Amino acid sequence: MKDILKKLPKIELHCHLDGSVRPETMYELLLEEGEDMEDISLEQFEKMAKVVDECNSLVEYLERFSYPLKVMQRKENIERITYELLEDLSKQNVKYVEIRFAPFLFMEKGLSFDESVESVLKGMERAKGDFNILSNAILVCMRHESVEKSIELVEKGEKFLGKGVVAVDLAGAEEGFSPENHKEAFDLAYKKGYNITVHAGETGRYENITKSIELLHAERIGHGIAAIKSPEVMELIKNKNIFLEMCPISNLQTKAVESLDEYPIKEFLDNGILVTVNTDNTTVSNTSLDKEYELLIDGLGFSIEDIIKLIKNSTEATFLTKEEKAHLKRIIENGLENLKSS
C-alpha cells in the first residue's frame, strides 16, 4: 500500500512555507544568524521545531513558527527554503503545489514587500526547472493585523497576479478575530481578480465559514471542520461548490478534533461536499501527503479509489486558468495510467 501511495501523482493546496522549512536548514541558518544553539544538537532542535501529538491547542501549535521566521528575513534564505520545499515535494511525486506565506512576516529586518514575494517566486521558478514541479503562491493576510494591513497586501501584491501569485488568504488564530474585520480588503481582492481562500472553522466557530463565504468571497475554506456542527453551513458549502482544504494530521495535533473517529471528512464526502487533503505544515506537523493518505486508509477505512477521488478534487480546486488546469489534469491522468500499468 505504501508503495502505491508513494507513486500516486499528488497535489498540495494548503501548505504554509514557514511551517515547512527543513529542520537542518533552519538549524544551519539560525547558527549563521548568531542564535545561541551551543547546547542544542540538530536532533534536539528537530524535536523543538515539530509539534508532538500531545499539543494542547492551535495557539500552542502556532508557537513553533517562531524558529523559521527568525531565518526568513533574508532574500537568499527565503529563496532557498522555497526551493528546498519544492525539491522535497517533488520526491513525493507532488506535481503541483500552492505555497502560502505572509509577506509582512518576512519584513522584520528591512526586506521590502516586493523582495519577500520575489524571493519566493525565484525559488519556485528555479525548482520548476530543476524538479519539474509546478507551483503558485498564495499571499496571507493575518487575522490579528488591521484591515489596513490587509488592504496594503492586496494592493502591493497585485503586480504579481498571474506571475506566480494566484490568491489571498486570511490566517491565524480565529478566537477574537472575526472574518468581517477584513471585509474591505477582501472586497478589494475580489475586484482585482485574486482567487480567495480563507482559514475558517478550524476551531469551533462554524459562523466563520459562513462569513468567509458570504462576506469575504471565499472559493475555498482552509480546514472547515466546524461545518459538521451546522447542516445549514454544510448545505451552503455544497450549494456554492466551495472546496474544503482539510489537513487531518494538523487538525488532530491542534485538537480541532479530539480523535480521528470524530474527524468529519467521511461525513462531508457522503454529503457531497468537495474535500481536498493537504499537509498544512510539513515540518511543524512532521507530515507528508503520503502520511495523510495513510492515516485515512488505516484509521478511517479509505480505499485507494477514495484517495484518487480526493486528488481529482484537488485538481478541480486549484487556482489555475482553464488551460493550466487542463494541462495539470493530463499530468495527473498520465500518472494514474502509469500506475495502473505498472
Image: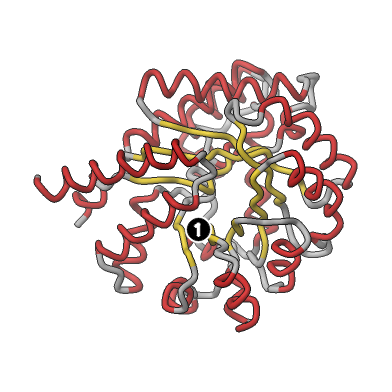
In the image: residue 266, left or right of residue 223: left
Disc 1 residue crowd, few under 14, some 14–19, many 20+, Cα 10 Å: many
Which residue occupies the extreme left position in the image? Answer: 342
Q: Residue at x 44, y 37 (%)?
A: 323
Q: Residue flagged by tag 1: what amino acid is it?
A: Cys
**Along the line of sight, the residue nearer the viewer: 191 or 309:** 191
Which residue is tagged 1? 247
In the image: residue 62, left or right of residue 26: right
Q: Residue at x 46, y 27 (%)?
A: 84
Residue 197 is situated, as x and y percent measured from the top left of the image, at 64, 52
Residue 146 is situated, as x and y percent measured from the top left of the image, at 89, 46
Q: Quadrant of the N terminus?
A: bottom left
In the image: residue 49, left or right of residue 266: right
> Toward which corner of the image does residue 77 lie, by quadrant?
top right
Q: Residue at x 62, y 81 (%)?
A: 229
Q: Quadrant of the C terminus?
A: top left
Residue 95 is situated, as x and y percent measured from the top left of the image, at 37, 38
Residue 129 lies, with reference to residue 15, above or below; the image says above
